[in-house]
Amino acid sequence: MTQTLVQSPLTAAERCDRCGAQAYVRVVLENGGELLFCGHHAQQYEDALRKVAIEFQDERAKISES
């Protein structure tokens, strides 16, 4: 049986691990660890993060929604 992880949407309470701003990206690592990033830091580190992520939950489109 294969288990599928379903991530819940990010909320305003979840903060960037780098600067403390609202997180719009969740990166799940193979060891089960999780990193949260604001749009700016997600963009800055995206290439490296995608290489180590088993899941890259990107909700940056919410930034431009009104």
Image (cartoon, grey):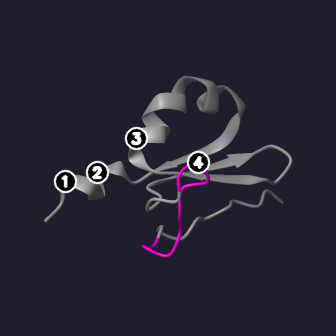
Q: Position of residue 25 (x, y in %)?
A: 49, 51
Q: Amino acid at mark 2?
A: Ala
Q: CA distance from mark 4 to mark 2?
A: 20 Å
Q: CA distance from mark 3 to mark 2?
A: 13 Å
For image coordinates 28% across by 51% down, the residue present is 61
For image coordinates 54% across by 56% down, the residue present is 16
Q: Position of residue 28 (x, y in %)?
A: 69, 49
Q: Amino acid at mark 4?
A: Arg
**What residue is shown with label 3?**
40
Between disc 4 and disc 2, the foreground one is 4
Between disc 1 and disc 3, the foreground one is 3
Q: Quadrant of residue 4?
A: bottom right
Q: Is residue 10 above or below residue 23?
A: below
Q: Is residue 60 above or below residue 51?
A: below
Q: Is residue 50 left or right of residue 40?
A: right
Q: Secondary structure at mark 1?
A: helix
The numbered mark at residue 64 is 1
Q: Secondary structure at mark 3?
A: helix
Q: Which residues are magenta?
A: 11-19
Tell me which label, 1 or 3, sits earlier in the chain.
3
Tell me which label, 4 or 2, sits earlier in the chain.
4
Q: Which residue is nearer to you in this view: 49 or 30? A: 49
Q: Amino acid at mark 3?
A: His
Q: Are marks 2 and 1 in contact (CB under 8 Å)?
A: yes
**What residue is shown with label 4?**
18
Q: Which residue is nearer to you in this view: 11 or 1? A: 11
Q: Position of residue 30 (x, y in %)?
A: 81, 43
Whether the magenta-drawn stretch holds residue 20 is answered as no
For image coordinates 79% across by 56% down, the residue present is 2
Q: Position of residue 45 (x, y in %)?
A: 54, 30
The numbered mark at residue 61 is 2
